[in-house]
Image: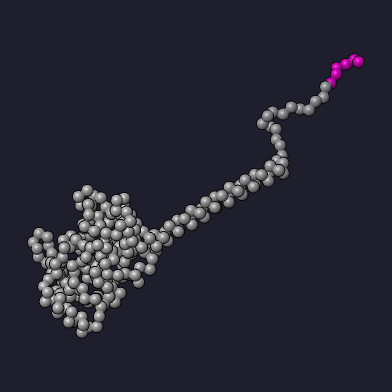
């Protein structure tokens, strides 16, 4: 056969020019993968907010653990805080506590007029009780020994205080190092944040309730008819001043 021969073939394509259409199967897999990732993310978010919300509710309304600092509750709580710095960590019951406060309980409360600061003290008297005031607990200047203005801020010189409804009288176990109701008077029960359940740390005191063995020396006439309170007050007054430990 004469003449040139012509060979026909399909033109070649460079690699980056090659395209392919997605198959229906791969498209479904990609969509399912994205949907699964979104659901996982949503599930993690829901779980986080559920755990966070539950923890917040528990701390605000059920239980809380805090340390006791300072020397006002020595030797009952944190007896080594001022020497070695070791503090007691206490578990506080916060569930419907206003109706469960009793004399002798240890409570965590917001300080009167200072809602961001908290105190830990013992409940000495509840509403209707009468507290016989001890002049040695009266707020004094440590340097001069003179009475501070706080001594008259709420009628400290009355010598006795009847606890009004919805209030309690609180004191520190260490009367030499405490600022308590002898400084600011009875406190509203609405300020109480928790009632001590047990010491949780240090380990050798874990589970203990050291406050149960401490007996306050403050004299209290428990709530009773007014005439009976007057008679009991005269008897207690004739016995002389209180003798704090």
Residue 115 seen by the camera: no
Specify the quadrant that holds the C terminus. bottom left
* Outermost residue, bottom side: 227
Identify the colour scheme used: one colour
Task: Point out residue 39 in the picture as x, y percentages from the top left corner.
Answer: 58, 51
- Residue at x 27%, y 52% (from the top left corner): 87
Specify the quadrant that holds the N terminus. top right
Residue 52 falls left or right of residue 114: right
Q: Splitting the image into 4 quarters, where does residue 159 fall?
A: bottom left
Task: Tell which of 160 and 221 is nearer to you.
Answer: 221
Task: Point out residue 153 in the picture as x, y percentages from the top left corner.
Answer: 18, 71
Residue 11 seen by the camera: yes
Task: Point out residue 230 in the picture as x, y percentages from the top left corner.
Answer: 18, 82
* Outermost residue, front side: 213
Within the magenta stretch, is there residue 138?
no
Q: Give the range drawn in magenta.
A: 1-6
- Residue at x 64%, y 44% (from the top left corner): 30
């Amino acid at each position: 056969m004469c003449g040139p021969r012509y060979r026909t073939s399909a033109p070649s394509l460079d690699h980056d020019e090659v395209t392919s259409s997605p198959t229906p199967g791969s498209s479904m897999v990609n969509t399912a993968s994205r949907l699964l990732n979104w659901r996982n993310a949503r599930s993690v978010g829901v779980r986080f907010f559920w755990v966070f919300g539950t923890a917040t509710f528990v701390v605000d309304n059920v239980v809380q653990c805090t340390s006791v600092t300072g020397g006002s509750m020595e030797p009952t709580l944190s007896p080594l805080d001022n020497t070695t710095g070791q503090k007691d960590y206490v578990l506080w019951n916060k569930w419907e506590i206003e109706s469960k406060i009793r004399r002798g309980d240890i409570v965590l409360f917001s300080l009167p007029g200072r809602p961001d600061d908290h105190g830990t003290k013992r409940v000495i008297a509840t509403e209707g009780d009468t507290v016989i005031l001890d002049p040695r607990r009266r707020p004094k200047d440590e340097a001069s020994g003179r009475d501070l203005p706080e001594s008259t801020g709420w009628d400290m010189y009355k010598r006795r205080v009847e606890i009004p409804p919805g209030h309690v009288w609180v004191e520190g176990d260490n009367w030499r190092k405490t600022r308590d109701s002898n400084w600011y008077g009875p406190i509203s029960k609405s300020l109480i944040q928790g009632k001590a359940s047990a010491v949780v740390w240090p380990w050798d005191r874990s589970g203990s309730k050291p406050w149960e063995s401490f007996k306050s020396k403050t004299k209290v006439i428990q709530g009773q008819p007014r005439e009976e309170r007057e008679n009991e007050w005269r008897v207690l007054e004739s016995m002389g001043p209180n003798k704090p430990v």
